[in-house]
Image (cartoon, rainbow, N blue to C red):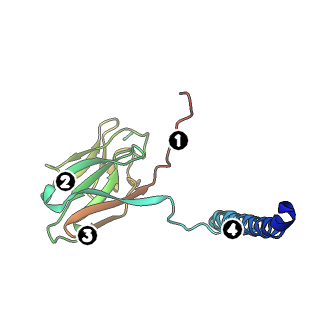
Amino acid sequence: MAALKDAPADARRRRFIVAVSRAAMAAGLLGGYGVFGSVLGRFLYPTGDSGTVWQFVASINRLAVGESLIYTTPAGAEVHVTRRDDTGASEDFTALSNVCPHLGCQVHWQPQHGRYFCPCHNGVFDREGLGVSGPPEGMVLSGYPIEVRDGMVFIKVEATPLVVPERGS
Ligand code: FES
């Protein structure tokens, strides 16, 4: 007798559980398709800048006119950040790779001459990174976009992908 009385309550509970399960499943599917659509959209229509980031280098007061520092990017590239003027603008600075375009030796900033020098074959580059004598004459040091914001120097560099360590290693 009691089982017959409880039957409508059980049916309502069952319908409620089925409805909640369907709603949860629909929400999961919508979420999954949304993530998939987002990833697919970025794959089909990549933005040009997705692989670069602005990195803080130093306060502008860190470098006097004619001085240079070596900045190491997250990817390990070494960049000469050199100050050539004192207006406080982005144009005061250059950011140039320290890799010689001739055969890949490291170039050095020579403040006393206002130039970059490659000791491997006596290559000389002007302060803009143009090869002016030796084997790299006419070649250029690779440059990086540079910006001054609120008294701080930033350069735009390749982003470094996250490395996820394998389990057990
Ligand atoms: S590698 Fe720099 S001049 Fe040859």
Tags 4 and 2 in contact by the CB under 8 Å rule? no
Q: Secondary structure at mark 1?
A: loop
Query: Real-space Cα distance between discs 4 and 2?
Result: 64 Å
Ligand 1, seen in the image, is in the quarter at top left
Residue 164, which numbered label?
1
Residue 65 showing in the rendered view: yes
Tags 3 and 4 in contact by the CB under 8 Å rule? no
Number of callouts in the render? 4
Q: Could you say which is closer to the camera, residue 59 or residue 86? A: 59
Residue 78 location (% of width, % of height): 34, 45
Q: Secondary structure at mark 2?
A: loop
Which residue is the site of mark 3?
149
Residue type marked 1: Val
Left or right relative to 68: residue 143: right
Residue type marked 4: Ala
Which residue is the site of mark 4?
27
Mark 4 CB near ligand 1 (8 Å cut): no
Up the image or down, 159 lies above or below 106; here it is below
- Mark 3 and mark 4 lie on one chain; the one further toward the N terminus is 4
Tags 4 and 1 in contact by the CB under 8 Å rule? no
Residue 74 location (% of width, % of height): 39, 47
Residue 51 location (% of width, % of height): 50, 58
Which residue is the site of mark 2?
114
Q: Marks 3 and 1: which is nearer the front?
A: 1
Q: Could you say which is closer to the camera, residue 34 or residue 80? A: 34
Left or right relative to 73: residue 24: right
- Mark 4 and mark 2 lie on one chain; the one further toward the N terminus is 4
- Mark 2 and mark 3 lie on one chain; the one further toward the N terminus is 2
Q: Residues within 10 Å of mark 4 (few under 14, many from 20)?
A: few
Residue 63 showing in the rendered view: no
